[in-house]
Amino acid sequence: MSFNPEFCRNESEVESKLIVQYLLPQLGYTPDTWYQEVAIGSIRLDFLAFAVQAIPFVLDANLPLSVVMEGKHPKQNLNNHVPRLRHYLTSLNVEYGLITNGKEIRIYQKFPDDIQMRFQCSGKEVDTKINKIKDLIGRERLKERQTKNKPVPQIPGYIKRENLMKTIAIYHNKGGVGKTTVAVNLAAALSKKGKRILLIDIDSQSNTTFATGLIKFQFEEEDDLREQNVYHLLESGDFNFIPDIVRQSQYFNNPEIDVIPSHITLIEEQDKLNKILASRNRLIAKLKRVEKDYDLVIIDTPPSRDLYAEVALIAADYLIIPSDLKPFANQGLPTVKNFVKQINESREVVGKPPINIIGVLASKISTNPKFLQYTFPQQRSVISKRYDLPLMEAVIYDRTVLSECMNQTITVGDLEYPDPKSVIKYAEEVKTDAQKSATEFDVLANEVLRKMGVN
């Protein structure tokens, strides 16, 4: 038996074709060990599966060794449903919860103070990952623990979720140094490693929004981003929270990534926000509300020292400075350092420590052998000697494939629409130079995780 997510066009089909016809039988659950549409007080569960026979259903000590399964519409963002799943597991003392929209499958485990994601894959991968799912929530595995009275397993190095989410700003006041390329493909590489990523575009050029496939319209009247974008997070502290604004990238990566889109209208709205002092700190407060739903937040910033750059750097924990290491980019580094100094003063006012500079990232670097042998080493040495900034070990080379994968299109009728891909996904589909770039971003992702102390 295999599963094809393309056959799930609505919530009902996710429940029937993925959960009932595929997952429950594959995991060893029989009709007498699972219930559908379970009502327990005010809680309504889609499915509740037990390690042992559950007829008649009784709310007793066996419940912790059971699994809640929730099916959502394919267009639904799973992050929006994690708080409710948390409520189910903690209220009912159920150890595991599975949530899926057909395109993505996640498994969460309950711990004393919170829940934590233990597994994630795309719907297309479920056939190859079914044994891993069985190891977590298969009936035999739960039954084995029940009969042996085994304690709830702990994840090595597990710490409380409230301090786990990290936010990284990608910033340089010089344009054309590969900020967006770094932001979107680093997000893709981290997502591929199982990290839950939120990507925020706070640049009015909206390059990240475009690169993640959210601009699927050709005419202004079809623009579905004008009324729901990053500006709306900043305009008020009382409404328009991240779950209200977030979108899922479209065919950009596997798994897809949550994105807060930008819009060209950010330019005209900046004067309004500049008059509201609190607007600089609203992103901090709104990220705080979703800190249990993401591992890493990546913010693509404008190449300027404007309000939006301030917002990003005040909210971030870490800073990466992409640079092609050419003279103009290097001459801008003192300005970046002065801006960071100014930002740190603002951070101190709101009780945040100074931003941690991960380093200058060499990006858009020529692959010419003579350049790499003679010029590049000199360019690298300048960063620490002259500008007293850390230099990252990873290097992102200037390869045609990086623009090629972002400029993919799809034809629908007589119209051609953007259909960009991350270089990580492109490398899986097209065996070209994409694999080299994908490896470079994998190396970058590993360095970033290591320097932040994230497993």
Image (cartoon, helix red, strand yellow):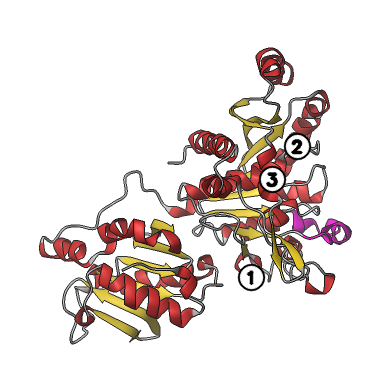
Q: Residues within 10 Å of mark 3 (few under 14, many from 20)?
A: some
Comparing 407 with 380, the one in front is 407
Disc 1: which residue: 244
The Cα–Cα distance between marks 1 and 2, rounded to whole angstroms, is 29 Å
Residue 395 as seen in the image, left or right of residue 313: left
- For numbered disc 3, what is the local secondary structure? helix
The disc, 2 or 3, on the residue closer to the chain's N-terminal end is: 2
Horizontal and vertical percent position of residue 234: 74, 61
Residue 114 as seen in the image, left or right of residue 238: left
The residue at 16%/74% (across/down) is: 52
Disc 3: which residue: 404
Res. 172 mark:
2
Vertical side of 273 occupied by 90: above or below = below
Highlighted magenta segment, given as a residue range: 263-280
The Cα–Cα distance between marks 2 and 3, rounded to whole angstroms, is 24 Å
Asked if residue 274 lies in the magenta stretch, the reply is yes
In which quadrant of the rendered view does residue 278 lie?
Answer: bottom right
